[in-house]
Amino acid sequence: MKQGSKKIDKEQIILQLVQMRIVQMATTKTMLEYLMVELKYHTTYSYELINESKRRIGEIFKEEHQDSYETAKARLEQIIEKTESEKIRIDALKEMNKLLGIYKAIKIDVTTGGEKINQISVIKLIEYKKNDSDDKTKEE
């Protein structure tokens, strides 16, 4: 298959996924099953296609609802400027970040210390020997 035709196929599949989500109200699980069972794609590539389709849906929504977007943004800006409550201001800022698309979950890798997950790590077990002086159950 040529490089160009592969790109067209990818675009067609993304459009199918967008159609599945919008028209058929398909869940991520349904779309994943379609890609993996029907089209025989690997899991990673399937999720990549699903994420791209979600991004496209967001773009479509943003284009179609630009007026609503601007109104919501203006209301949040007013709340942020006029409110006396710090809690309300913080909540409004969070909503503004979501609206602007800059509110993303930050994923932190706490399990591997930055190493690749597929690397084999050696775990050293340290045996702690209890001293007799540490024993609190000893009679005095």
Image: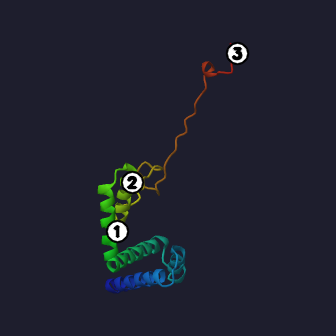
Check the image and tell me how it is coloured: rainbow
SS state under label 3: loop
Q: Position of residue 74 (x, y in %)?
A: 30, 66
Give the residue pinned by disc 1. 72
Q: Residues within 10 Å of mark 2 (few under 14, many from 20)?
A: few
> Which label was assigned to residue 139?
3
SS state under label 2: helix
Position of the N terminus, as image quadrant, is bottom left
Quarter holding residue 135: top right
* Any part of residue 100 in sight: no
In 3D space, how far apart are the residues under numbered discs 3 and 2 (Cα atoms)?
Answer: 59 Å
In 3D space, how far apart are the residues under numbered discs 2 and 1 (Cα atoms)?
Answer: 16 Å
Q: Residue at x 31, y 56 (%)?
A: 82
Q: Amino acid at mark 1?
A: Ala
Which tag is nearer the camera, tag 3 or tag 2? Answer: 2
Q: Position of residue 65 (x, y in %)?
A: 35, 77
Q: Residue at x 51, y 78 (%)?
A: 31
Of the image marks 1 and 3, the number of the one nearer the N terminus = 1
For the residue pair 117 and 67, the one nearer the viewer reads as: 67
Q: Amino acid at mark 3?
A: Glu
Q: Position of residue 43 (x, y in %)?
A: 49, 71
Q: Residue at x 52, y 44 (%)?
A: 123
Q: Amino acid at mark 2?
A: Ile
Give the residue pinned by disc 2. 88
Which tag is nearer the camera, tag 1 or tag 3? Answer: 1
